[in-house]
Amino acid sequence: APGASEQQHQQHQQPPPPALAFGGGAVNIDVKVSYRRLPKGTYTKLQPRSQDFQGELATDSAADLRALLEAAMVGRCTLTVGDEVSVLWCGKEYPLLVVEVQPDDANGAVSLLETDVEVDIAPSQDYEEAMKRLAEAERARLTAAAEAVREKDDERRKREEETAAATAAAEKAAAE
């Protein structure tokens, strides 16, 4: 029957709604896709996740950092703050976090199509965390040193007050 064939054909043209499996059941979800024109990127700052990038790759004279960054970016159409870009060198992957893009008039997203992008490499997250720990330790050391100085000053004042009180008592006794 031609009616049944048309119905089967129509069923195959319309994909089923997306479903996610949760605990044996399926949940239908609606997805909204919208397109936005992004400005062409002119600048980005990338932050290595670990010190390995600076310690191994950036100091290796055989590594052409510019070519490695270009290879990592060539397959990308956009770059967004929070994205991770991976640089591959000698079989090792070096993840870099996008921490800044310019122009920043599209909520941290830029187009990489037909544009040259200046790239800065920030200190690694490991390095920044180590510097924070070092600063906290220094702050604690300075606080402890300041407290020790206060305690010594308090003890000195107390001795001075006791000496002054004893001198005043002695002078009063001598005057009587």
Image (tube, rainbow, N blue to C red):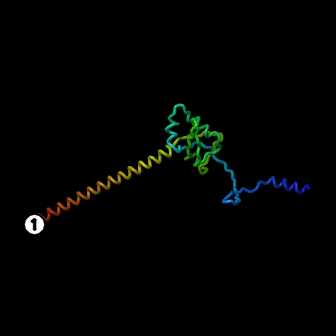
Front-most of residues 73 and 21: 21
Q: Which residue is mark 1?
A: 173
Quarter of the figure that contains the C terminus: bottom left
Q: Quadrant of residue 116?
A: top right
Residue reaching furthest to the right: 1
Q: In this rendering, would 4 be left or right of 98?
A: right
Residue 91 appears left or right of 15: left
| Place of residue 156 in the rendered image (x, y in percent of width and height, measured from the top left) | 23, 57
Residue 163 image position (x, y, % from top left): 17, 60
Q: Where is residue 96 drawn, in percent x and y? A: 56, 43
The reply, left or right, for residue 85 in relation to residue 140 is right
Farthest residue in the front direction? 24
- The answer to which image quadrant residue 15 occupies is bottom right
Quadrant in which the N terminus appears: bottom right
**At label 1, which amino acid type do we have?**
Ala
Tell which of 131 and 165 is nearer to you: 131
What x and y, as percent, mark residue 26? 70, 59
Seen at 35% across and 51% down, the residue is 142
